[in-house]
């Protein structure tokens, strides 16, 4: 698995987690402020699309994960 795939898996996981914890109808609801994490992930994805740089991808590459296409 390449670094870009892992980044997208992490992003999807964090979005689902924040929705689970932030939506009032969820059985695991904690607080609506968890939805801010969803916004943060979305902004980071947009930023990485424009700048072609992602912190998590840089960290993964330092740990030896191969870069994707």
Image (tube, helix red, strand yellow):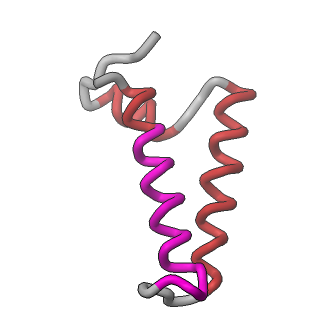
Picture residue at 45% right of the left edge, 27% below the top: 4
- Quadrant containing the N terminus is top left
- Residue 55, position in %: x, y? 51, 39
Taking 31 as reference, is 43 above or below it? Answer: above
Which residue of the protein is positioned furthest toward the left in this rendering?
64
Relative horizontal placement of residue 65, taking residue 43 as reference (left or right): left
Magenta-highlighted residues: 8-26
Tell me residue 35's x, y (percent).
Answer: 63, 72
6 in relation to 39, above or below: above
> Picture quarter containing residue 50?
top right
On the picture, is 37 further left or further right than 16? right
Residue 20 location, x and y as percent?
A: 49, 74
Q: Nearer the viewer, residue 22 or 64?
A: 22
Q: Who's the residue at 71% across and 38% down the image?
A: 47
Rendered residue at 44%/37% (across/down):
7
Q: Is residue 12 magenta?
A: yes
Question: In the current view of this chain or complex, which residue is farthest to the top?
Answer: 69
In this view, 11 is above or below 4: below
Q: Main secondary structure of the magenta part?
A: helix
Q: How many marks?
A: 0
Measured along the vertical axis of the image, is residue 30 above or below residue 55?
Answer: below
Report the residue at 40% width, 30% height from top: 5
Q: In the shown orientation, is residue 22 left or right of residue 59?
A: right
Instruction: Locate residue 52, reporting x and y percent.
Output: 64, 24
Q: Is residue 14 magenta?
A: yes
């Amino acid at each position: 698995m390449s670094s870009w795939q892992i980044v997208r898996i992490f992003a999807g996981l964090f979005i689902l987690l924040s929705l689970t914890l932030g939506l009032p109808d969820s059985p695991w609801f904690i607080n609506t402020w968890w939805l801010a994490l969803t916004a943060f992930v979305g902004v980071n994805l947009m930023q990485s699309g424009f700048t072609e740089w992602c912190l998590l991808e840089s960290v993964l590459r330092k740990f030896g994960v191969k870069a994707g296409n």
